[in-house]
Amino acid sequence: MDTLIDSAVKVIKKSKYTTAFTGAGISVESGIPPFRGETGLWSKYDPQVLDLNYFYSSPKESWTVVKEIFYDFFGKAKANDAHIGLGILEKKGLLKEVITQNIDNLHQEGGSSIVHEFHGNSNMLVCTSCSFKDKAEHIDMSRMPVLCPKCKSLLKPDFIFFGEGIPPLAYQKSINAAKNSEAMIVIGTTGEVMPACQLPLLAKDSGATIIEINPETSKFTHSITDIFLQGKATEIINKIIKKIV
Ligand code: NAD
Ligand code: ZN
C-alpha cells in the first residue's frame, strides 16, 4: 500500500490541475450511510420517497421520510478527516476543485471552498410556487408536509429528486473541472449513478490520471482507475496528507 500511496502523492504533486470527485462513501465515516449496500439507506427506506412524481402526489409521506433521513439525522453529521484533508490540499494549492454527488454540505464544512454540488444541497429549502428560499434550520418542520411560510405551497429540499435534471451551473462547472483535470481523485462512489459517473470518464478521456479511494471495487476500478488505494477515505487521505504537506 505504501508504494501505491507514494505513487499517488507523486501524481498529485506533479499535476497542475487536480480535482476530486466524491460520492456517499466519503461521508460514511461521518455517520451518514450510503444509499446502496447492506447498511445503505435503501435497505431501510423505499427509494420512491425521493421520486419527484411521488413527492408531488404524496407530499406528506415523502416529506416524513425526507425529514427523518436528511434533517433529523444528516443535520448532526460533522466533516471527517477525508473532507478536512481535501480542504488542506486545496489550501496547499494541490487541489483545484471538488465535484460531489453528496448533498450534505460536509466538503464546505471541511474547508473546501470550490465545491460543485452535482445533486444540489440539503441545507436549503425552496418553494415550489413562489421565489421563497431559506436554510432548512430556519423552517418549522413540526408539521408534514413542510409548507412555504410566505405562500403556503409545498417546500422542497434544494437537492434533486429522481426524475429531476442536474442543476445547470453545477453541471457546466463539473464538466469543465473534469476536462481540465490532470489528475482526479475519485472517492467513495460506486460509479453507478448517471450522469455523474461520466465525469471520471471525461477526465480520463482528457488525459487525467485517475486515483481511486474505496474499500471496495467500483465500476471505475478495473476500467479507468490508474492507482487504486483500497481502504477507508479517512485512512487513505490521512496517509496522503502526511506524505504530501
Ligand atoms: P453509493 O451509495 O452508491 O456507494 C457508496 C460507495 O462508498 C461504495 O462504493 C462503497 O464501497 C464506498 N464506501 C463505503 N464506505 C466507505 C469509506 N469509509 N470510505 C470510502 N468509500 C466508502 O454512493 P454513490 O455512488 O455516491 O451514489 C449514491 C447517490 O446517493 C449519490 O448520488 C449521492 O448524491 C446520494 N447520497 C448522498 C449522501 C450524502 O450526501 N452523504 C448519502 C447517501 C446517498
Ligand atoms: Zn412560496
Image (spheres, grey):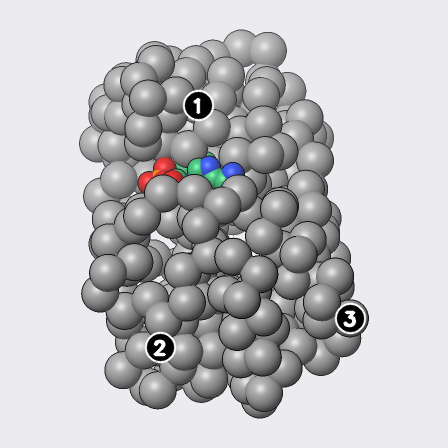
- Can you give x and y, in whole percent of width and height, for residue 2 in the image? 57, 61
In the image, residue 68 sits, relative to residue 191, either above or below, namely above
Q: Which residue is mark 1?
A: 66
Which is more foreground, mark 1 or mark 3?
3
Which is more foreground, mark 2 or mark 1?
2
- Can you give x and y, in whole percent of width and height, for residue 9 in the image? 60, 73
Q: How many marks?
A: 3
Mark 2 neighbour density, 10 Å: few (under 14) some (14–19) many (20 or more): many
Q: Which residue is mark 2?
A: 203
Q: Which residue is mark 3?
A: 245
Mark 1 neighbour density, 10 Å: few (under 14) some (14–19) many (20 or more): many
- Can you give x and y, in whole percent of width and height, for residue 22 in the image? 47, 54
Real-space CA distance between mark 2 and mark 1, rounded to the nearest whole angstrom: 33 Å
Q: Of callouts 2 and 3, which one flags the residue occurring earlier in the amino acid sequence?
A: 2
Which is more foreground, mark 2 or mark 3?
3
Quarter of the image with the C terminus is bottom right
Secondary structure under badge 3?
loop
Type of the residue with mark 3: Val
The reply to whether the residue tagged 3 has its Cβ within 8 angstroms of ligand 1 is: no
Q: Of callouts 2 and 1, which one flags the residue occurring earlier in the amino acid sequence?
A: 1
Residue at point 70%, 35% (across, down):
78
Secondary structure under badge 2?
helix
Secondary structure under badge 1?
helix
Residue 116 appears in the picture as rendered: no
